[in-house]
Image (cartoon, rainbow, N blue to C red):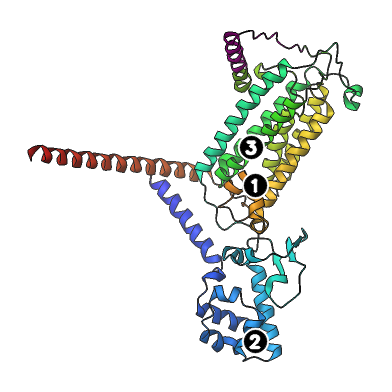
Amino acid sequence: MTICTEFQNMEDHKQAARAKMRPKNVIDWSVRDVESWLLQSGHTHAVEQFKVHDIDGKALLILKEDDLNRMDIFGIGKTKRLIISIKQLQKDNVSQLIELGYLEILHTPISYSSKNNDVITFSGGTVDNSIDQEFYSASVSENDTASHLPPEIWKAFISLGYLFIVTWITAFVMVIVHDRVPDMKKYPPLPDIFLDNVPHIPWAFDMCEVTGTLLFALWLLVLIFHKYRFILLRRFFALSGTVFLLRCVTMLITSLSVPGAHLQCKPRNVYTPDSVSFYNELYNKIEMAYVIWRGAGMSIQGVRTCGDYMFSGHTVALTMLNFFITEYTPRQFYFVHTFTWMLNMFGIFFILAAHEHYSIDVFVAFYITSRLFLYYHTLANNQALMQRDSNRTRIWFPLLSFFESSVDGIVPNEYESPSVIICNLVKYLKDCGNHLRKCTYILKLEKNSNGNVSSKKKNH
């Protein structure tokens, strides 16, 4: 326990040092802090008037040139130079303007540029001297990293429940589409440029699942050591569940013919002449869905299904794992990133070489998964974009709006050593034990008090 205490003290010192290094938020500035900023910026002539008008950090951030002109104490040159400094301060603190609700009142159309520091410019309408038509940085801080990252473990469990439900729906839909698979004699494989020119490799599909297992093992390592593992978990569960839910729809609405003659695909003979047979058949489907769900739809787990072609679930899993590993590992890990991309591409090649999917299945799966990942992270990393159209975000990206409500920027790739992880786990278990003891003690007190009250009533 002393070792854990020492490590905890070290971590507390590190956090304190980081806090000292971080500059004080502008919205927390006092009038005296504003005076110091004016002196450092070379605007000594404005110090007294700012003190008279009680200008603190919040007031400073939303000052306009008209406000300075009303003070009627500066020359034109001094006023212009001061407003340039204020606008630079506003540009560097866009997230705080959003927090104050100041940017939400703007209704001018915006144009977004992804160059350099991801700058948003406000255009349209009449041009005046307000800050509304100025440049704003879309980043939350100078280095774009988030300043507030609560773990919110309960959200991770909600996203896990969402994925759990979706995987069950997927397994059940796979049973349905298996029974609807077109007759191979009547509907031969469709023409496909890749499948028509690459011979069938029997062991290729198993190799695809081996590459997926390697990617999953790497992803587990990232999760174990990443400091913000619960944020990563809920993002992974939410995105995976959404893509597989979309896959359920595409599988169900269109049944493609079997892509390879080597596949022995026949629908089951299903007869439901009465209600008893119907319930028996429903039970059989649920039982088959459980087999698929338990084996994660993998052939190396003994799962063989037909009809679930549009689009490829294996490609979704490979691509999602690859993108999450590359996103949440340091940029300097070139070897890891190259390795995961190679596994992703080889896995896709093995799917096609096994003639288990058409080329369009794989292409659509890769495109949808990668685009959804990028759209989600672009919005999550740029709170300015989310706040500008929060109603549309809630409608079109409800999971994003819910899960990322407490994240105000890019999640930094910070890792914990095994000793810190163990100490944090011990501390968490100790806190849980103390909480349980408190709850038990409170329940005992309530029980004793209720017993005393009832005994007094009996005596009376």
Q: In this orientation, does residue 134 appear?
A: no
Q: Is residue 153 magenta?
A: no
Seen at 62% across and 91% down, the residue is 72
Marker disc for residue 69: 2
Which amino acid lies under the numbered mark 3 shown in the image of this protein?
Trp
What percent of the width, then of the height, locates residue 413? 62, 50
Location of the N terminus by quadrant is top left
The answer to which quarter of the image holds residue 319 is top right
Q: In the rendered structure, which segment of residues is drawn in magenta?
A: 265-288
Establish if 294 lies above or below 70: above
Instruction: Give the distance between the C-alpha atoms of the residues marked 2 and 1, in whole angstroms.
Output: 43 Å
Seen at 67% across and 32% down, the residue is 244
Which amino acid lies under the numbered mark 1 shown in the image of this protein?
Ile
Q: Nearer the viewer, mark 2 or mark 1?
A: 1
Which amino acid lies under the numbered mark 2 shown in the image of this protein?
Asn
Seen at 47% across and 41% down, the residue is 422
